[in-house]
Amino acid sequence: MVGAGSAVVNTYPLASYTFGTKEPKMEKDTSVADRLARMKVNYMKEGMRTSVEAILLVQEHNHPHILLLQIGNTFCKLPGGRLKPGENEIEGLKRKLTSKLGANSPALVPDWQVTFFWLSSVLSVNS
């Protein structure tokens, strides 16, 4: 039973999706300390910036799974990133998802279906 204020999210089998590879995109920083230092410099120059991340849910073996991006050999993260100044969250998230997960062909732009859930400030996405 779904309670008041709850939402239902449709999940689709992992086999419904096609996966390929993209050229590796190297991280800007080699350590957490380097990342924090870069973020501090950016904050001093640009001020507060909004970022978005997506939770991509699929179903495999009758259970929901979250897909993550693998960065290098040891690090995984949710897809997303910083918004451009004045960019709204949905369009910015679609832009980030397309750049990180979409095909390298302009003819194959995904039609991302974005659903917001403000549970602990989490944003959820269905594709």
Image (tube, rainbow, N blue to C red):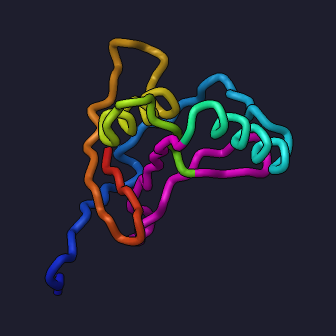
Left or right, 50 with reference to 91: right
Tell me the residue at 72%/43% (across/down).
Answer: 40
Left or right, 46 with reference to 74: left
55 part of magenta stretch: yes
Residue 87 vs 43, above or below: the answer is above
Q: Position of residue 51 (x, y in %)?
A: 48, 44
Q: Position of residue 63 (x, y in %)?
A: 41, 71
Q: Nearer the viewer, residue 28 or 7?
A: 28
47 part of magenta stretch: no
Residue 90 vs 45, above or below: the answer is below
Q: Position of residue 18 (x, y in %)?
A: 43, 36
Q: Quadrant of the C terminus?
A: top left
Determine which quarter of the picture holds residue 73.
top right
Q: Position of residue 87 (x, y in %)?
A: 35, 32
Q: Nearer the viewer, residue 45 or 8?
A: 45
Q: Which residues are magenta?
A: 48-77
Q: Quadrant of the N terminus?
A: bottom left
Q: Nearer the viewer, residue 46 or 14?
A: 46
Main secondary structure along the magenta-highlighted residues: strand
Tell me the residue at 33%/13% (across/down).
Answer: 107
Total number of numbered discs in the rendering? 0
Tell me the residue at 39%/62% (across/down).
Answer: 59
